[in-house]
Amino acid sequence: MLRRRLNRLFGRDERKVDSRTIYVGHRPCPATEALIPPKFCDNRIVSSKYTVWNFLPKNLFEQFRRIANFYFLIIFLVQVIVDTPTSPVTSGLPLFFVITVTAIKQGYEDWLRHKADNEVNKYLVTVLEDGRRACKESEKIKVGDVVEVVEDETFPCDLILLQSSREDETCFVTTASLDGESNHKTHYTVPDTERNLESLSATIECEQPQPDLYNFVTVFSQCVVFFRSLGPENLLLKGATLKNTQKIYGVAVYSGMETKMALNYQGKSQKRSAVEKSINAFLLVYLCILVSKALVCTTLKYVWQNRPGQDEPWYNQKTQKEKDANLYLKMFTDFLSFMVLFNFIIPVSMYVTVEMQKFLGSFFISWDKDFFDPEIQEGALVNTSDLNEELGQVEYVFTDKTGTLTQNNMEFIECCIDGFQYKYADSGTELDGFCVTDGPVNILQQKAGREKEELFLRALCLCHTVQVKEATGQGDGVADGVEDQVDGVMGLDGETVGPADLGGFIASSPDEVALVKGAMKYGFKFLGMESKNMRVMNRNNDVETYELLHVLNFDPVRRRMSVIVRTKSGDTMLFCKGADSSIFPRVRQEEVDRIRMHVERNATEGYRTLCVAYKLLSREEYDQADTGLREAKLALQDREEKLMAVYNQVETGMSLIGATAVEDRLQEEAAETMEALQGAGMKVWVLTGDKMETAKSTCYACRLFQRSTELLELTVRTLVDLGRKREERLHDLCSWVKSKPVSAFSVPPRSWSSANQDYGFIIDGATLSLVLNSSPESNSSCYKSLFLQICQNCTTVLCCRMAPLQKAQIVKMVKNCKGSPITLSIGDGANDVSMILEAHVGIGIKGREGRQAVRNSDYAIPKLKHLKKLLLGHGHLYYVRIAHLVQYFFYKNLCFILPQFLYQFFCGYSQQPLYDAAYLTMYNICFTSMPILANSLLEQHICMEVLMDNAALYRDVAKNAMLGWGPFLYWTLLGVYQGLLFFFGVRFLFSNPALQDNGQVFGNWSYGTIVFTVLVFTVTLKLAMDTRHWTWINHFVIWGSLAFYMFFSFFWGGIIWPIFQYLVPLESFQTP
């Protein structure tokens, strides 16, 4: 590992070839092999940041990169080196406290990472060694080992599947930890491999590790003359889980930090909150005040000393060394001394208090019982505690649709066969199969031909990758759950469909399960696979068997999938299903006209639609396709492109049979949540990959679009203008849309709705590409500017047909626009990770599409409805609390140091401290820290219920309102006023000479202690007056802090100092 890092450091790459050779089971290298097999990395996973040896230097280096810590380190060194008026302890102890607390926090977090790494690395796995099964720790697996994995276990490294316990030589896995998909995926063994793995002698030539989860090219060779080309369907990825398969055997090809999971690990970028930026700005102001004070005092000191008799009074004669000192060096030293004297105006302890407030405050989100979801038995999760206050500053919300606004729980609603509608009836009051054409007809009840109906239902039962869940103790090939549940379901002709278990299927997509269940409602049941045969029971309860020849897998580019099957009669058929935009160009136009209206109507109603087509393949067509597919699968280069070419060739000239409509229901309280967010002044953007009609209907259902909303559309179909360039048309449309509301930019940017009209904006992915990636000769920035102006003045924006990368581009564009608005992204799937990472605040939903979004998010919630309380309740309170904390810290430190500055005017600018060193050290650490920390954790200026019921209250703190320059000036002037009052008020009391009981006058320390006492009581009682929500903790820390101060003052001033005063004379008498 060290060698690899050194190579990377000096720009060299140890992997000089594009492939690696692996010997299965570590068989000896052939005699003809000239090269020594390379050494591969071990299987250890390392996500920790520190080790025992580098923790101290590395952590200190990172902490002192923070300007405030580095500043106080310099002040501490100045106190040590230069003869300053205060002890180095006064700066060193608070700095040590801050550094120590932060180091403990970061060390604890890294210890948790070490603990998680050890759980993975020390996990016991079974490996075949010399024909025997042996258990070893996961970190000891080597590339080439044959590993055994049983059901529900995760794969310890990247494996090529050699054997499976299933008869069809497949296995099922879930990759939720990798790409967020919780549905089952099918993987295949290497064809025709030797069954006895102990005697297997094979070589694997595969590509070097790379992070793409969906691409993998390798050649498996056995006995020199036997070659097989393998792809991603043969690769089992580390982190995936084996499902519905008793056990498998696989050979390790990538291990440890070279696995695809490790290569895909993307550390989160450091997100900074707006509060932290405000703190830095205020810090600069106070730093300027500090330098100004030091300059004023240094200048006045030398002006005063230039007066006759003031530079060298009779009682303070200069030494020869002082007389010979360089004047300018002495002035600089005095300047540094004044800087040290006044440096407490910079509140170093504020940083650790803010860190503790964020860390402890995050537990209140995790502990909130309203976030607990009994369905998944989980509550909210906080992955990043540094952004609590950002939840109260959100201006733009970017949300996914499927699984976020909707439940991602598909239900078959209806279908259309040959232009006729079939809607399943749940009750027996009307005949199932009641059909109405989408156009005007005279006959009320019509149906397609029986042959078309059965062809359509067969297509639904065959064109998928659904598997029937294996059952224990069943030998008939039908899972025990498939013949179990729904009685009395009416079929197409009114006959009763036999019972079937609607939960016995596993598939890579919930849509596929919904379609198979839909076919069951109409009498066609998919019974599962036997070897390479698919079994279907028709409405006559006859079992039909189809030989599965090829599966043309779904991909987001083609947006369709197909199967090629052979019937018992020898006919070869292709069944295809996919999006309307993908299927319509590949079928006859007259068939499209009968179906299109049905598809558009279902999309408008918010249903997800798929079109179904078929093709009867001649022997020549099949042979050509079969040869092309086999050659493409064996290709080592450009395999995907070659497969795509064969797919496109065979999926032409099809016949359209019908279309399906599947409903994805809205999330619980989705409409109320979106309405509350808009009422709080946030602008909601829906970013989805679905078609425009479906997404638009969802927006209406969620109340993002109202019936009175005027929709401004900028999509591909609006750009169609013959004889003109698309970009010219785009510019014209952007200008036209911008000019729609006359007074658009004379009103606040909340919306154009102040003109009694709400506007919504719709754009698709293709048009967005034109906006963001215009040609060089066009004015790209002009398009972006117009686009942003339109979007910022609409209440809701809908972006449909979006790729994951485009989602991130949209978020980045808004985040970086003028004003730098705070953005929030929320999603539940792997395709939402990019926009979650890009936004200021990322929210993951613990939904059905795995946990990839949850792991990459800053906060995770079980349901969309919880977003309302997270933002309007917790976010509002967290922002108010930390804003008050920051302003209060600067205020109390200004009150603290201003009397010290004023005192210099009465002590000849001698740098004499006003306060005792113990008070200087403990003011921020002990006397005033706990009350403000408790207040910043528990304060509720408005109760949670009121905040939830009145979304408009969120606007009161928007745009960092409480940390603006206005509130900052108020707190600063308040600190100046009270500091003047403390100093001159006590001075007025001392204007009447009084004597102590020993006859001495009150001196410097008495004066400073009285000022300090008034200071501590005033700033503490000020906080008590600002507290509106009192708990026993507030009472304890506020009154307890005052009591502790009184006890410490009595102990320090009444016991410790008198002892010192008594001991000093004794020592002087003992000196000879």
Image (cartoon, rainbow, N blue to C red):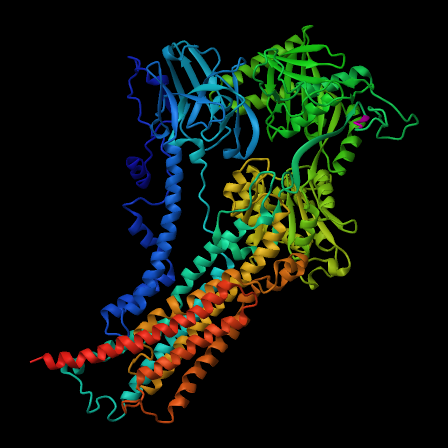
Q: Nearer the viewer, residue 895 or 438?
A: 895
20 on left or right of 268? left
850 over 253 or under it: above or below: below
Q: Is residue 422 found inside the magenta-colored segment of the image?
A: yes
Outermost residue to the left = 1072
19 on left or right of 521? left
481 over 976 or under it: above or below: above
Which corner quadrant of the image does residue 911 belong to?
bottom left
Q: Residue at x 57, y 56 (%)?
A: 875
242 on left or right of 656? left
Q: Quadrant of the N terminus?
A: top left
Q: Position of residue 682 (x, y in %)?
A: 64, 55
Q: Is residue 501 found inside the magenta-colored segment of the image?
A: no
Which corner quadrant of the image does residue 548 belong to?
top right
Outermost residue to the right = 442
Q: Position of residue 775 (x, y in %)?
A: 59, 43
Q: Nearer the viewer, residue 540 or 453?
A: 540
Q: Residue at x 36, y 33 (%)?
A: 44
863 over 245 or under it: above or below: below
Q: Residue at x 53, y 38 (%)?
A: 851
Q: Position of residue 210 (x, y in %)?
A: 43, 31
Q: Position of residue 841 (x, y in %)?
A: 54, 50
Which corner quadrant of the image does residue 403 belong to?
top right
Q: Magenta region: which residues? A: 420-425
Chief secondary structure of the magenta span? strand
